[in-house]
Amino acid sequence: MVFIPLKLAGEAAAPLGAMVGTDPAEPHLLVVPQPRNRDLRFAFMSELAQIMLPYIEGFATAKETVSGRNERERYLDAPQVIVPGRRGVEFVRLLGRSTRFRRSDGPYPVDPSVPVLGQWLTFLYERGELAGSSALLAMTDALSLHWATGQSPMEDANLATLLAWISPPPGLTGQEAAAAAENPIDRPPAGPDTDPGFDAQVLQPAIRAYDASGSPALVRQALRTQLEPTWRLMWEAVDLMRALPEAASVAERWAIDRDQYTREVTRLAEGGPPRGRRDQAGPAAIRLWDMEGAQQSYDAQRAYDDPLVMTEHRAAGKAFTGEAVHVDADRKILLPGGKKPVPRPLVTVRTSDPVRLTPGKRVFSVHRRRQSGEIVEIDGDLIVVQLNDQLAKGAGVPTPGDAVCFTELDLGGRIRPGFPTGEETPWTHGGPPAAYVPTDEDAVEAWS
Amino acid sequence: MNSPNHRLDALRGGVAPVDHNARTIAALAGNPGCDRRAVLDAAGIHKQSIAVHLGHPAPFGQSPFALDRARAFEELVKADGCAHLVRLLRETLGLSVPEVAYTDIADVGGNTAHQLRHTRTLAELRRAAEDGERSGTLFDHPLLKLPVAGHEVYLEPSVIAFQIRGRFHIVEIKSFAVIDGTADSGQVAAASRLSAVYVYALKALFRAEGIDPDRVSHEVVLVCPKDFANHPTATLLDVRQQLASLNRQLSRLTRIDRILDHLPPELTFSLEQSPAELARAIRTVEARYAPECLSACEMAYFCRADARVCGSVDVLGRATRDELGGLESIDAVLDLTAGDRLTSPEQAEIADQLRYVRAVYREHASAGAEAVA
Amino acid sequence: MTVPHSTPYSTPHSTRFPTGGTAETADSADSAGGTGGFGSAAEAAGRATAAILADFAGGGHRGVIVDSPPGAGKSTLVVTSTLELAGAGERLMIVAQTNEQVDDLADKIAMRNPALTVGRLHKDGFQVPERVVRHPGVTASKKIDDVASCAVVLATADKWAYVSGHTWKWAIIDEAYQMRSDKLLAIAALFEQALFVGDPGQLDPFSVVDTERWAGLAWDPMQSAVAVSARLNDLPVHRLPVSWRLPASAAPLISEAFYPFTPFRSGTAHGDRSLEFTAAGFPASWDGTLDEAAATGWALHELPSRHTIRTDADAVQACAALATRLLRRGPVAHDEHGSHVVDATRIAIGAAHNDQVAAIRAAGVPPGVTVDTANRLQGREYDVTIVLHPLSGRRDATAFHLESGRLCVLTSRHRHACVVVARAGIPELLDAHPSTGRVRLNVPVKFPDGWEANHAVLAHLAAHRVPG
């Protein structure tokens, strides 16, 4: 689902409008004709919920059973929301934050779908913080992973100029097309911030017209001009991305997104409360651990999957490829404290890469994932690696002449240590915090 | 040789200089390595006019909605003799301010002349400083003065609060939201740099008046809307690092003559020349373009266009430029990579690296082509 | 007494700890002049240790913090405290950050008291070195149940994180400024009271992910173990006032540049230490630099200004060649303990990046000379160090290059002399550095600022410049 939100300048999270949908031919245009009116804002959120919730909840149908140590059910597919850029991702966080504590009863009631949407937007944002998740993507980030341009990373954060470099119109160079795409009249900003000139010359009169007449037509028209060009760019980018071959680890990563989606569906069905405003000590530590683990796995997977990504690591001396010129497959050694010798084959690799690993360094085989070894000796362009595991199945040892690649990049997967729960928070971290209970105050938090 | 001030006047081409303000002073730290910007700023030249004349206007502007919001929020905080502010100083910051006097310095018999307001500010602050601990006072619409590059600059902080533990505090009112105790770190940084200018000016003023400058706190009271509401909240900002940086930038401004010495004596940036002539004149002062300039300097789009025409590696960003180890142009990089250029000894290492990466890329590009075929 | 939230005010001298008093344990105004200074410095250090032990073992506080500038006797304090507590029949756990640190402490404790039972807990597959297992009192194991009964159990923070089912009354946490808050959280249930020992001027913990989400929280997991405990508790802070490592030529600069609010001094005076070359040989172009370093304790080996890639061949070559030439000249160090030959193991070369380290090693360094990054040199000590300046050859300074802790580690490992290798032009680079960093609400400002620290060090080195 493509989601392009706009916000009112000067406000933290006052929605102005959005274009959203799953079909390039059928964008839904939602507007807030007077963004300072809170009832209209909540009406907008409710309208957004009518479109997003059926999409998000619609994946909770067919399940599979995942066997193994942690047997569980998992939905076969999961939602994916794509916004134009990182500012859009941040706006999703703020929309989630500003709606998840709302209630459908009490002093300032909202439509029951609004807090549910708030919970889902929060879920998507928090998934998106973990490397390798595809639940919530910034299109500019996704494109930058696959294409390099002749402009700076800062300018690559602009969807219009980035796409102009990637696929310039016929007759123009990337640089010319990008220069043309900077004109805010032809290529309005991809949001959530709007062009100040547009605000002054078009939007302000349109909002005044609404105040006078009660008709949102002018505001709708104004916002359509700002959103439609980006909508077309977003789908152009979706087509570009879909034309790329899928990397080997994508299925594994998407399975994690599906797992987490399944958990959230269950949690919400059981009446799970909205997430607190900030993390407490324990959850913060757990989340940092998970984020670092995800980043490590993702970096390694990308390099393992894509030889061009591995090139960067090879150039930096953290990986090397070459030919196995000699293999001592039957070597056995006695480990310190061990009773009988265990197999520890040696592989000698000839490489032309500028290796900067040193003897003793733990390395992993790219061709036999999860097999680790250590560098025993480096002599000129010859590197001897001792293989330490994944040997029992027989297929673990290369034969002379094989192309091999070893790297220090670790796919990760360590078990997380136990962190204290809220009531076990030790004195070093301030002791047990007051448990978070969503309060009436949260629910009626003023939305000026 | 003319005095620096005469030179700067000549550069401006007879037009009156634009006044510095807290924002332009704070911006001095944005790219201090750029001679072009240093000269234009020191001469008080209106950079946006130059950029427009050159055909490369910067798309800076503020939305009317943002301006309305900022104005409305400041009015709210200051309403009823800063009632909200007093409450925040007491509650949020836990200060025991027994009795608060409110003085509107702009209220000088209807006369709003700068010099008059400044004189009154000075008198009120002096009285408060000598009065000691007895009263807490808020000064609204104060006007400070700071000499910058030979010119007096008037500065208008939001409010000055006296008597938070015996020290004067700058109060800065901003309309960006503080949500769950956090705010956009770029906007907080901008607010810190801006308030550091006021703290600096107030300290300078105290020093000139023979009052201990340490009676001005390096902690600024930042007042912002809380969460999604209009309701204000306050946070203390420690601006010591911004003060140190400001101190360095202001002392550099006085050394502008070192740059001026290298410029042709007849040079002028007068808008009465043709754009091409003006562009030539501007180019005699070296720029240090980086993509970050695009959001900070009115001249950036002109400098970027120039950098692109020269094929400078500056357009790729500071990180990439640094990795290219001193290569200045994209053509030089490509030539070295392709091996079409004789390598000077200094370029040997970077050339090796580039060629290695090229070889590996070609290996995979051809492997990919075979797979497709 | 605990203070649940820090007050928004910080006093000028306690920028790291908005709450919590600072216990000045020694009069740092003592002047170190001649051997009299040495004596009074020793007394000052002794008083500091006694006060710390009284505070910790006295039980009035759940935690005690000891700030130790470089070479101020941190490990001695850890060992002494351990023996004292164990001598009184108490069981305790010791946490360090790397296996090397754990092994060093285990070795020292066992050496001081061979009768003590010492458990060295380690991860599966780790080889505990001979210098540790040679002591009869030491038991090494990967399982906590094998060592839990020992009077003292040592392990890395990473290993302790997986221990459960045992508790200790006392914990000593070494290099606590390099330990992240989340790592402390994982082990804090194991102990009741803790002594945090560390050097606040060295490198802060870091993460490869964006941690902005927690900025400003009192329990932000990215802070150091010391920062979080001090922010949420009212803990006494002691300082070790005397550096026994840094010579009189270095302590004032390091103190002023990196510890602006907590000055310390050298335990030795000018003249107590000297470096002498015993072999002349043919004069070489490196001799000017080495002579300056031997005579003054500092040398800036300055190469012509140029922007280079990180592994600048000239600078890398200079580092390796200076180490080689230094050894050839037969250096002998004279200090308060006597005289000794400075062999390769007493020399280190430090750099900012791993690729620089690899390049220097590849350039041909005499066997035995340590070459490593600042991160890995933390806590180590040498007679002479050679430092590839992090800003050498750079066009723009990044936050990484400017981090004051990095330069502090690199310039404070030596007992006699430090040679800095750099391209000319760093002052201009600092001048051109934009101050546009981000600011987060409620995050204590860190001092010293990297810019100011770099500037102070360069200003000092300017007087020791030798063109290379």
Image: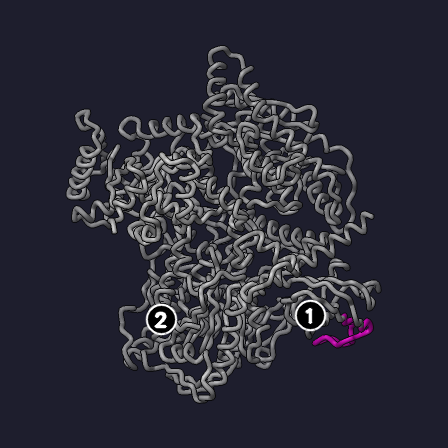
Left or right: residue C83 versus residue A367 is left
Instruction: Indicate whether A144 appears above or below C351.
Output: above
The residue nearer to you, when weighing C223 against B219, is B219
Query: Is residue B49 one of those drawn in magenta?
Result: no
Quadrant holding the N terminus of chain A: top right
Q: Is residue A139 visible?
A: no
Left or right: residue C71 versus residue A409 is left
**Quadrant hosting residue A125:** top right
Q: Amino acid at mark 2?
A: Ala
Give residue A56's position: percent from left, percent from top.
Answer: 68, 31
Q: Chain of mark 2?
A: C
Query: Would you call the spot at circle 1 few (<14 residues within 10 Å), some (14-19), or many (20 or more)?
Result: many
Give residue C267's position: percent from left, percent from top.
Answer: 34, 76
Q: Chain of mark 1?
A: A
Magenta highlight range: A328-347
- Whether residues under marks 2 and 1 lie with C-beta atoms below 8 angstroms apart, the answer is no
SS at circle 2: helix
Give the residue displayed 61% in from the left and 28% down from the top: A229
**Quadrant hosting residue C269:** bottom left
Name the residue furthest right: A394
Q: Which residue is mark 1?
A: A375
Name the residue furthest top: A213
Query: Is residue A341 one of those drawn in magenta?
Result: yes
Q: Amino acid at mark 1?
A: Ile
Instruction: Indicate whether C215 appears above or below C103.
Output: above
**Quadrant hosting residue A177:** top right
Quadrant holding the C terminus of chain A: top left
Q: Which residue is mark 2?
A: C251
Give the label on residue A138, or none. none
